[in-house]
Image: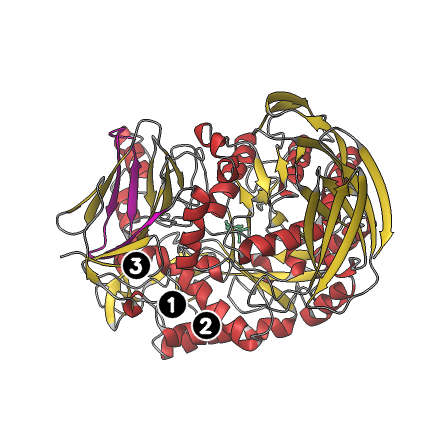
Amino acid sequence: MVSSASPIPSVSVFSFGNPIETGAFVQSPKTWTWTKGVLPAGCSLTPREPKGFSIKFDLGERDAVVGLGQHVGPVNCRGNTFRLFSTDCPVHIPSLRSMYGAHPFMVILRDKPIGIFIDAPGEVSVDAGASTSETIEIKVTNGGFYLALITGDTVKEIAAKYIALTGTSFIPPKWAFGFHQSRWSYENESSVRSIASKMREHDIPCDVIHMDIHYMQDYKVFTVNKERFPDMPKLSSDLKKDGLRLISILDPGVKAEDGYSVYEDGKNQGFFCKRADGKGDFIGAVWPGPSAFPDFFREDVRKWWGDLYKPLKAEGFAGFWNDMNEPSIFYTPDAFKEFAKTIHRFDVENDFSEALANTLWDKGVVNKESYYDDFTHTVDGEQVPNREVHNLFGTQMTKAVADSLAAEDPTKRYFLLSRSSYPGMHRYAAIWTGDNHSWWEHLSLNIQQLISLNLTGFLFVGADTGGFSGDCTPEMLVRWTQLSAFAPFFRNHAAMWAKNQEPWAFDEKTLALCRTSIKMRYALMPYIYSEFIRSASLEEPFIRGLFYDHKEAADRLDDDQFLCGRSLLVAPVVKAAAHGRMVYLPSGSWLKVQGSENGLTGERLQASGDTYIEASISETPLFLKLGSLIPMTDPASHTGAESSTNFRLLAFTDSTAQCEILLDDGETKYSSWESYPKVLCSVAKTNGKWSALARFQGVAPRPIFLELELWSSDGTRETLSVNV
Ligand code: GLC
């Protein structure tokens, strides 16, 4: 029998078998009222042997499928297959089916769109009309799951209902909206200090430096290498004076080494995952070599792990970066022995046969999938193989930290980044898109991922700017920095084997162009910060595919341009040696704007439709929607130095336009958009005359200086300076 509940209007949740509670829903399904349910027309469900389910939905000829969070390929998922099974995937090629995060929420775009969320923590595969073009088939491997069906008139309504069901986005402190510089690894104190001083020397705004695995002693989590970093608290407090914060990476694998307190403690308390064959703790190798993995599915283990972060805060780390939490497993001692035995069978001097080649190819031990059958978690008091709850591992690890950071000071926001994720985690951490490459294709892919992840509720996201693996080129760094300047999470990060790609790593021209984009980001901070928090609070994506606001764009589902907030259309240049690109502007009036280190200024009106727009290496095609008011300020060297009284506003309207500028302290939590301290600015054009007003909300009025640039759709431009 199928039971169903309707926790919010237009949402029906169906329950099949015995679902495992994942925490994706804000409220526990146990609290809902369940009655006998009937699946709607166009949707069918069949059980699969030995267990699991197949769910099918009819697809009309023109229907598109959007969402599915982190994936490769176009925004429109139709015609592709996906396997949602969290995976450490170092090469993001088009045939890749699984990535770090598993996000089983999608919308079938049609006249009456429908949202589908499959809440199942094991593998979920989606055949979005690849095998049979008129059907989308979703296969669930768990013996029970929840299916939420969301109806509405627009994708916007459906996305908002999905957020109402699963919760609003994580909002980090303001400094996290600044520029982050990272590398695997800035491996000692002098290299970190040198990065910090180069930022200031080269006049590059920056708020954060990331510390990758070399800050640890032998990759042991929660340790600091005292030779490389003799006085971390002093280093972090010196940097803080200059507005720079340090973030430390942490992995779930705890080095299995006698005498190492975290390992001893976890082992003695029985906190590590058990082998499925009952022979003690499961051991798998990651950076530190053989390691044990905490069973984050247990509340007591999460509490223990969460508390371990506290001493790192005392070292001066301002935020944390949870990595490798799919979890990635390079090998297990068992698998390695098995591999060695297989290889041994060959005559090492003479046997260079096809059989050897096949063995080397097939029997690889890195991230072998069978590892996820080899260890268990404690779920509802029972030992369950990792595979059954696999997609939740990283989320449970991140929850451990989030709970601890939130409990430490419930009034303040914190910064937490995770590689693996599952719906629900978007409420308490940010994600990045993992180990991309310095490939132009990945610069393009970055746009799709920003759009799809934002639609799936993960708002504070971004990619490794410049690319992680492979060598970035000067031109690519410039173009990528231009794109990431609009991404919520803006971090330049590179692999150990990649060439340096800090803004100054190439030549003066590249440095100057990167500086301009980063300064523009800081000049736009009042818009980006306020608009992001508004989107997060009001159940909207911040980065939007054009189809989100413009129904006419649903037929084309462009992957190469996006809206940053409600007002600004960004069409980045993502091709090598390009001096322009095609841009599509939905019907309506648009103002082409120029970006510079001072933010945006109007350039000229731009007709809607498809147009080739010139864009030299210093330009990104940017457009303002009619009815917009964009707040900006002078770019500061870090967010803490930003002015809260002097703003520049760029308006494009024929009547009125409003914007909200947050005036909060950048770290206090507020329960709603309404309660944030802010100033509401508005401009009006009456009988050809412009006026401006400012109204304070939740904060004492203060003198504010506004410099306005005012455009109308007849192409007229005026300026105005007012003290309000
Ligand atoms: C993983 C992460 C990457 C990090 C590296 C070393 O590959 O995805 O960002 O730099 O591990 O810690």
At label 1, the amino acid type is Phe
Instruction: Say which element carries label 3.
Output: loop
Q: Quadrant of residue 95?
A: top left
- Which residue in the protein does label 3 denote? 6
Tags 3 and 2 touching, CB below 8 Å = no
Q: Indicate which disc, 2 or 1, sits on the residue closer to the N terminus.
A: 1
Question: Overall secondary structure of the magenta stretch?
Answer: strand
Q: Is residue 635 visible?
A: no
- Which residue in the protein does label 1 denote? 296
Q: Neighbour class for label 3 at 10 Å: few (<14), some, many (≥20)?
A: some
From the image, which quarter does the C terminus lie in?
Answer: bottom right
Q: Which residues are magenta?
A: 123-151
Q: Which residue sits at x=39%, y=74%? A: 301
- Looking at the image, the residue that sits furthest to the front is 687
Q: Neighbour class for label 1 at 10 Å: few (<14), some, many (≥20)?
A: many
Q: Is residue 138 visible?
A: yes
- Report whether the residue tagged 3 is closer than 8 Å to ligand 1: no
Residue 325, magenta (yes or no) = no
Which of labels 3 and 1 is toward the front? 3
- Report whether the residue tagged 2 is closer than 8 Å to ligand 1: no
Up/down of 516 relative to 400, above or below: above
Tags 2 and 1 touching, CB below 8 Å = yes
110 left or right of 441?
left
Instruction: Say which element carries label 1.
Output: loop
- The spot of residue 44 in percent (x, y) is 19, 43
**Count of residue discs:** 3
Instruction: Say which element carries label 2.
Output: helix
At label 2, the amino acid type is Trp
Real-space Cα separation, disc 2 to disc 1, in angstroms: 8 Å
- Which residue in the protein does label 2 denote? 305
At label 3, the amino acid type is Ser
